[in-house]
Image: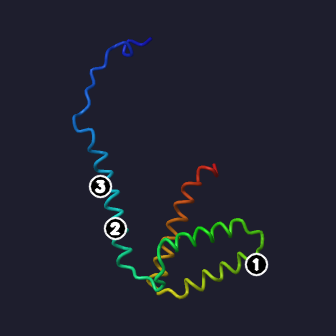
Amino acid sequence: MPEWLLKKDNYTPLKDKNSFIDKSILSIFNVLAMFRQQTKIRNSKFGINPLTKLISTLIIIIFVSLSRNFHFIVITTVFMLVLTNLLSIKEIKYVVKASMAAAIFTFIILLPAIF
């Protein structure tokens, strides 16, 4: 066995161990605060309860993923395009940016599966 493995290690960690965790938590809170400010600024034309939006989105995702009928998928796509068309230019840009961010994130996560 090498000699350096047999020596006792005299390492003493720094007293301030939590600075990394504190910085991480503060940065997460800052990001959440920015999202909250963005949602307060944006006023949607559709004054629907956010819980209703979330539930309906999940239901549409489930129905489209379980659908075996191509016509249902086309009708759902047309319906979503009509709803998107009713939004303002600023809201459409926000939707496209959020969609692109989600697509890029998904691509990065699935990239190792390609190789």
Three-letter code, disc 3: Leu
Three-letter code, disc 2: Met
Label 3 crowd bin: few (<14), some (14–19), many (20+), radius 10 Å:
few
Q: Nearer the viewer, residue 5 or 33?
A: 33
What residue is drawn where x is 64% and y is 52%?
A: 114
- Count up the numbered dots: 3
Q: Which mark is residue 24?
A: none
| Mark 3 or 1, nearer chain start | 3
x and y percentages locating residue 101 in the rendered image: 49, 66
Which residue is denoted by mark 3 in the rendering? 26
Quadrant assignment, res 108:
bottom right
Q: Helix, strand, or loop for circle 3?
A: helix
Q: Nearer the viewer, residue 108 or 15?
A: 15
The colour scheme applied to this rendered structure is rainbow
x and y percentages locating residue 8 in the rendered image: 31, 15
Which residue is denoted by mark 2 in the rendering? 34
Q: Give the left or right position of residue 82, taking residue 21 as reference.
A: right
Which residue is denoted by mark 1 in the rendering? 71
Question: Disc 2 and disc 1: Cα gap in Å?
Answer: 40 Å
Quadrant (top left, top right, bottom left, bottom right) of the N terminus: top left
Question: Disc 3 and disc 1: Cα gap in Å?
Answer: 48 Å
Whether label 2 touches label 1, CB < 8 Å: no
Q: Helix, strand, or loop for circle 2?
A: helix
